[in-house]
Image (cartoon, helix red, strand yellow):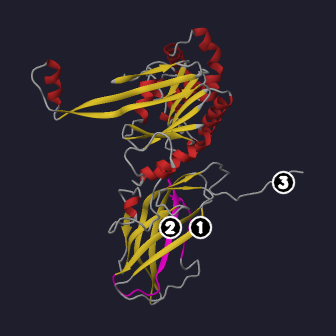
């Protein structure tokens, strides 16, 4: 392995045997008889390298093998085939606190974990103040860990893992532990590691963090490596993968423009709905009298691609298709965007925007498009849609769909609060 390489993953596969019933596993182990078994490839011939001082992200859908590859790199799992070479001392933020003894105090667990990582008592003592200050759990460090709240537990576990100054840091969705203030400390520490030139391997569903921190990104899909390259290119590819619009099962491992194909929201297969290309909420809440019914909807990015992810600052469109099942008096079409806590962040409707629809007869379809610049901060949001109106002056809900799908805003620069005022700064 080259001196400049910190992590080398060469043709690793991880295969699990799936049995029809638990007793089959025992029969095969004892050699009693041949039993039916299926092989599941959690990873299939995956290779990549991480250079010393590089920050590499790994993204992919659930079940793509992201956590499996990290566990193999850190030695938690053994590969079925292939090999991994590591040059440097690793600290892994995977299953925080997995090595803690619940009967020991916080201090005792710091020593226990430090010893398991290969540190002497003197080295742990030298780092103790940094660990305790970072965890900030007060006198509870002298109490058994079993008395801790879940928040205190992960704070201490994170503090131990992040403050031992490893040469290689491996992170699996661990930066969002604790309250918002502790999360801020975690990100600052992460940025400090990056400035110090540490090697970082980073798995996250937060596309904004992937885009902001990573020098290079690897895309996994169902155990296969689909591509690796610059963050923006791979994030764009991942957005298409999420909505099943990435063409070609054998996409090369280097990005080529002809492989980043996709529709424009109008070019779906005949009979296919727009929403079929979105990742939908399996528990959509809907109600209404159905004089008018929302039968289809979509989010489109600046390229006209149906997607759940839009880049901050880009023009995007929210579309819905509404069918009238009866005569409808001057309907109002609306959308709302909420955060994951359910707070309505923004939204509008055709009435607010000065669009008079007029009365509609039964049996017609209307396509409604809201076009706007995406100035929400990077993060995850939920989209709701509605069609309402007034019948003889009385308000009626024809059809409402709450939290139909997620909307991911990918940002390379966030400000304070929910949206960006796009300030221009002048210093004289």
Q: What's the distance in space between the residues labelled 2 and 1, CA to CA? A: 9 Å
**Magenta stretch: includes residue 333:** yes
Confirm whether residue 140 shows in the render. no
Q: Earlier in the sequence, mark 2 or mark 1?
A: 2
Query: Which tag, 2 or 3, sits closer to the chain's start?
Result: 2
Magenta-drawn stretch contains 113: no
Q: Residue furthest right?
A: 428
What residue is rendered at 28% in x and 30% in y?
16
Is residue 139 visible to us here?
yes
* Alpha-carbon span between mark 2 and mark 3: 35 Å
Q: Position of residue 218 (x, y in %)?
A: 49, 38
Q: Are marks 3 and 1 in contact (CB under 8 Å)?
A: no
Report which residue position mark 3 lands on.
426
The mark that comes first in sequence, 3 or 1, is: 1
Residue 164 as seen in the image, left or right of residue 40: right
Kindly identify which residue carries mark 2.
Answer: 318
Could you say whether the residue bearing mark 3 is in a helix, strand or loop? Answer: loop
The residue singled out by tag 1 in the image is: 372
Q: Camera-side residue: 182 or 333?
A: 333
- Dot label at residue 288: none
Image position, residue 32 (x, y; %): 9, 20
Mark 2 in CB contact with mark 1 (< 8 angstroms): yes
Seen in the picture, residue 192 relative to 376 is either above or below; the reply is above
Report whether 342 appears left or right of 223. right
Label 1 element class: strand
On the image, the x and y values in percent for residue 403 come to: 44, 61
Near-viewer residue (29 or 86): 86
Crowding at mark 2 (Cα within 10 Å: few <14, some 14-19, many 20+): some
Q: Magenta segment range?
A: 325-349
- Residues 306 and 18: in front is 306
- Left or right of 379 in this view: 419: right
How far apart marks 3 and 1 lie (CA) works out to 27 Å
């Amino acid at each position: 392995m080259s001196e400049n390489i910190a992590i080398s993953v060469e043709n690793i596969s991880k295969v699990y045997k799936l049995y029809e019933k638990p007793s089959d596993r025992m029969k095969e182990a004892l050699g009693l008889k041949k039993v039916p078994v299926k092989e599941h490839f959690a990873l299939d011939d995956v290779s990549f390298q991480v250079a010393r001082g590089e920050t590499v992200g790994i993204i992919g859908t659930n079940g793509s093998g992201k956590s499996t590859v990290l566990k193999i790199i850190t030695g938690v799992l053994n590969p079925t085939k292939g090999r991994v070479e590591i040059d440097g001392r690793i600290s892994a933020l995977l299953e925080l606190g997995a090595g803690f003894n619940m009967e020991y105090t916080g201090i005792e667990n710091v020593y226990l974990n430090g010893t398991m990582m290969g540190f002497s008592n003197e080295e742990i003592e030298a780092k103790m103040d940094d660990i305790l200050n970072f965890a900030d759990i007060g006198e509870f460090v002298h109490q058994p860990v079993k008395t801790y709240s879940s928040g205190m537990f992960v704070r201490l576990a994170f503090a131990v893992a992040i403050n031992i100054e490893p040469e290689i840091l491996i992170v699996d969705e661990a930066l969002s532990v604790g309250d918002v203030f502790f999360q801020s400390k975690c990100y600052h520490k992460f940025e400090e590691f990056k400035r110090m030139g540490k090697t970082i391997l980073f798995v996250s569903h937060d596309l904004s963090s992937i885009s902001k921190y990573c020098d290079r990104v690897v895309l996994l899909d169902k155990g296969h490596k689909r591509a690796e390259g610059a963050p923006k290119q791979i994030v764009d590819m991942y957005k298409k993968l999420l909505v099943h619009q990435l063409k070609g099962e054998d996409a090369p491992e280097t990005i080529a423009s002809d492989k980043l194909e996709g529709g424009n929201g109008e070019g779906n297969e005949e009979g296919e709905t727009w929403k079929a290309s979105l990742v939908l909420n399996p528990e959509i809440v809907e109600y209404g009298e159905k004089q008018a019914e929302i039968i289809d909807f979509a989010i489109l990015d600046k390229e006209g691609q149906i997607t759940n992810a839009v880049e901050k600052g880009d023009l995007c469109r929210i579309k819905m298709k509404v069918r009238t099942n009866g005569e409808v008096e001057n309907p109002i079409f609306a959308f709302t965007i909420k955060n994951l806590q359910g707070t309505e962040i923004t939204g509008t409707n055709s009435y607010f925007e000065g669009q008079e629809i007029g009365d509609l007869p039964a049996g017609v379809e209307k396509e409604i498009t809201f076009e706007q610049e995406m100035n929400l901060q990077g993060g995850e949001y939920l989209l709701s849609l509605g069609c309402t109106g007034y019948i003889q002056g009385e308000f009626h809900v024809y059809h409402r769909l709450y939290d139909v799908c997620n909307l991911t805003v990918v940002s390379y620069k966030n400000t304070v609060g929910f949206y960006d005022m796009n300030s221009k700064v002048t210093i004289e």
